[in-house]
Amino acid sequence: MSPTLLPLLVGLPLAAAGLTALGRQGARWPSVVLMAALSLNLAAALWLVTTTRSGDVLAHGVGGWPGGISIPFVGDTLSALMLLVTGLLTLVCSAFALTTGLGAVRLFAPLVLTLTAGVNGALLTADIFNLFVFIEVMLLPSYGLLILARRGEGRLGSVLGSRLYVTFNLFVSTVFLAGVAFVYGTAGTVNLAELAGAARSSPLVAAATAVCLFALGMKAAVVPTHGWLARAYPSTSPAVTALFSGLHTKVAIYAIYRVYAVVFEGDQRYLWIGVVVFSATMAVGVLGAVGEDTMRSILAFHMVSQIGYILLGVALFTPAGLAAGIYYLLHHMIVKASLFLSTGAIELRAGEGRLDRLKGFARREPLLAAAFLMAALSLAGLPPFSGFVAKLTLILAALDAGQVAAAVVAIVVSLVTLLSMLKIWNAVFVSREDTDPDPGGPGGSGGGVAVSLRERTELPRVGVLGSLPALVLAGITLSLGLGAELLLSLASTAAAGLLDTAPYVQAVLG
Amino acid sequence: MMLALSVGALVAGAAYLMLDRTFLRVIIGFVLFGHAVNLLLFSSGGILRRTEPLGSGPDPAVTADALPQAFVLTAIVIAFAITVYMLVLAVTGRPDEDAPTEEAEEGPTPDPAEPDAPSDTDDRSGADDRSGAAPRTTDQESRA
């Protein structure tokens, strides 16, 4: 197939979104179209990965206009890998939403499809202004998804979370747009290929691009601008939290990798800023999780911490560091979504996410418990899961680059992450129900504890269908850990594409 | 110079309004901020060449740069859409003020029982529904 098909990765989901928007409340066919379109999207991403696995770059200017004038779509190894994992997560999270009933809400399918179009566009574009537009295309359906709920189940908390999320993102987007204006004013172009190396030679362009990177850093929830994520993500429905955790901040991280690699050409002068800020992100995120008492807010803070790890890769800007960062990014998206899906399934059944109100889920839901345990150990970085490979390669790369302090922070933070995961595990899964002061057991009457206990035992089980999405992703992290060579070699190819941007530039400019 | 001063004044006003607790003022702050950035985009294309880039044989020496104009047009549309959506959020569900402590107290348990809690289908189905959302708002207020 030819690169001419690249814009279809944006066009087809948008067309499917328009189609499914026609569905009436209660109609089933939009869900079918949604799953079909997302499967097709995943297949296309897989094709793109196999095409670019040896480092080839596919590029297409929309409408056949010459490079530099056209709207460019570029697929290289990095964007293909990102497309593959985001496509997988969208598919799995949508399947989860369909099992929980959220997927039956009328506008769920078109919103998710528009989101997919925005994500694909942001990953494929080679133009900073189009990046802004695609990020907005990605964000607008997200605002809707954030407060999406089944009729009668809407919560005020999600409106509040949504207010925070919308204001924050509009602010950041406007700052990013100002950055684009500065870039255009100083460099005279917003095409990434034409901007290649511009920030290295001109301090003015460097300052202008720094405004863009600053905005992208805020979108990625880098400390000290991480507060919005920890507040907004737990306020929505679990399926949407899982979906957002895999897409939004990760697209910003991808853009940081891309812009720094192309426009700055990995300029060594500014890397220390990244090392300091991203090490702080690791530490602050994990410490923030200590004080939280609901499953999803703990996981949201851990996400902040992990974002520090991922971005440390670009702050090292060595072949090993970039490859480790890219591997970490892909591993993290899968693991985090798995954790959000397993805890989300419990939360939906129990109607409750607080650690002190949940007990004994290991016996009630053995499949979910297995999925959570695998993903949690992977997040903390224990072998044989992908988290171990990711952390090991990243820490070795940091030591190689002489960043001993960052490596030490990464190791210490891993230990705290493990403690935090054990906190959830002990509270929600292991602790037995009969350790309650009231040993009334099922059906026992009496005080508040016993009542909530009875309600809980009467809850329907999550079952196999609800556990499957989390389990599939947990299985992927295990297989990525056992067969790490495949993804590591792909990540190395992607890193090589960031280190030597000449093929990328040549493909875009034609 | 005039343009730079205008941008500065708009950003100053926007910063002042955004720091307010009232959500409506925050939204107006965003409108100002958006205007400031749009002016910035305009000025990035050069402000001295101002004739239209269309028609027969435009003279490159005096023709305005069309690209920033396209940028601004796109940005205006996006900002407008989000502003309208924020206005909907401002009237949905609860009083206009943002208080983080109340947000934390907002548990999932009391609300699902309420049949009239705001659901999303109401929020985005257009202007007709927005007037319908108003009684619910007062409902929630009186309960709180």
Image (cartoon, coloured by chain):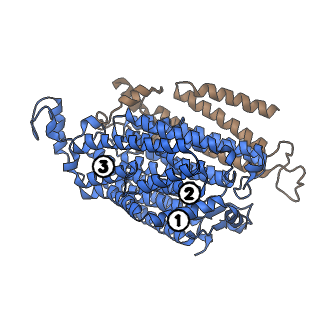
Would you say the residues marked 1 and 2 are in contact, meaning their CB atoms lie under 8 Å apart? no
Earlier along the polypeptide chain: callout 3 or callout 1? 3
Residue for badge 3 = A345
- Residue at image position (24%, 39%) is A358
Would you say the residues marked 3 and 1 are in contact, meaning their CB atoms lie under 8 Å apart? no
Residue A475 x, y percent position in the rendering: 35, 60
Q: CA distance from mark 1 to mark 2?
A: 12 Å
Q: Is residue B122 visible?
A: no
Please name the amino acid that badge 1 sits on. Leu
Left or right: residue A433 versus residue B31 is: left
The extreme bottom residue here reads: A1
Which chain: brown?
B
Residue for badge 2 = A320
Earlier along the polypeptide chain: callout 3 or callout 2? 2
Q: Label 2, secondary structure: give it.
A: helix
The chain that hosts pointer 3 is: A
Within 10 Å of disc 2 (Cα), the crowding (few <14, some 14-19, many 20+) is many
Residue for badge 1 = A490
* For discs 3 and 2, the disc positioned in front in the rendered view: 2
- Asked if A86 appears above or below A4 in the picture, the reply is above
Give the quadrant of the N terminus of chain A: bottom right
Q: Are marks 1 and 2 on the same chain?
A: yes
Please name the amino acid that badge 2 sits on. Ala
Left or right: residue B115 versus residue A448 is: right
* For discs 1 and 2, the disc positioned in front in the rendered view: 2
- Residue at image position (70%, 48%) is B71
Residue B131 x, y percent position in the rendering: 46, 35
